[in-house]
Image (cartoon, rainbow, N blue to C red):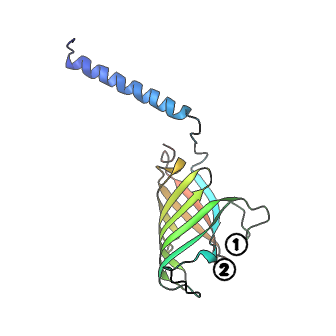
């Protein structure tokens, strides 16, 4: 076996590392089905289906009370909901939204918990936070969002129809890597 000096061994290792990084990145981007993020801002609208309201399996009908809560509903493309929060005739569904957490003020529907946004064909975004400031931290996801981080800001379209507009600001370089 040939003996190598430390200097030569380090130079060979550094060259191999650089080559692996270049080849590895090339292969990753060349793989079929590897989605690229079209934009760093995601803009969509969502509503809650009141039939999905669950407060711990009590099955009790009526107004929500303080305690655990689960809600779900569709995600729509931006501009799909009217001013009253109902879907327009040309509304485009983009996935499903789910929320689970704790309802601490039923009058204002103030909650704290976790939102998941399953965006069809792209992956899932996970958001944690409270409804106080209508912002939440992007804590991760799946698919092209598997390393996502950033912030979601929510605007109320209609409280009566439980409809919201979401703007997700993802940190540069976080998704799809």
Label 2 with label 1: CB-CB less than 8 Å: yes
Query: Vertical placement of 3 versus 75: above or below?
Result: above
What residue sits 48% from the left and 56% below the top?
A: 150
Residue 166: mark: none
Q: Which quadrant of the structure image shows residue 20?
A: top left
Q: Position of residue 127 (x, y in %)?
A: 49, 62
Q: Residue at x 38, y 26 (%)?
A: 18
Estimate how packed mark 2 is, as few (under 14), some (14 to 19) or many (20 or more) residues with alpha carbons within 10 Å.
few
SS for dot 2: loop
The one of 165 and 48 positioned closer to us in this rendering: 48
Residue 91: x and y, percent?
74, 62
Above-or-below relation of 155 to 30:
below
* Image quarter of residue 163: bottom right
Residue lying at 80% horizontally and 65% vertically, measured from the top left: 89
Task: Compare marks 2 and 1 and give the one earlier in the sequence.
Answer: 1
For disc 1, the marked residue is: 85
Q: Quadrant of the N terminus?
A: top left
Which of 48 and 139 lies nearest the eye of the viewer?
A: 48
Judged from the image, the secondary structure of the residue bearing numbered disc 1 is: loop
Q: Residues within 10 Å of mark 1 (few under 14, many from 20)?
A: many
Which residue is located at x 78 percent, y 61 percent? Answer: 90
Name the side, left or right, on which 164 lies relative to 126.
right
The Cα–Cα distance between marks 2 and 1, rounded to whole angstroms, is 8 Å
Q: Position of residue 17 (x, y in %)?
A: 36, 27
Q: Picture coordinates of residue 156 (x, y %)?
A: 62, 72
Q: How many marks?
A: 2
- The residue identified by callout 2 is 160
């Amino acid at each position: 076996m040939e003996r190598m000096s430390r200097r030569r061994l380090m130079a060979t290792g550094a060259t191999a590392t650089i080559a692996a990084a270049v080849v590895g990145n090339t292969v990753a981007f060349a793989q079929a089905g590897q989605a690229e993020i079209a934009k760093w801002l995601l803009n969509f609208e969502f509503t809650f289906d009141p039939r999905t309201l669950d407060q711990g399996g009590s099955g009790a009908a009526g107004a929500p009370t303080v305690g655990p809560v689960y809600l779900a509903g569709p995600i729509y493309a931006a501009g799909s909901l009217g001013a009253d929060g109902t879907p327009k005739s040309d509304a485009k569904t983009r996935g499903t939204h789910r929320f689970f957490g704790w309802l601490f003020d039923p009058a204002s529907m103030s909650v704290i918990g976790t939102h998941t946004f399953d965006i069809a064909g792209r992956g899932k975004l996970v958001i944690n936070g409270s409804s106080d400031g209508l912002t939440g931290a992007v804590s991760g996801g799946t698919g092209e969002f598997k390393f996502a981080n950033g912030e979601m800001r929510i605007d109320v379209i209609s409280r009566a129809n439980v409809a919201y507009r979401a703007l997700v600001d993802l940190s540069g370089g976080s998704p799809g890597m």
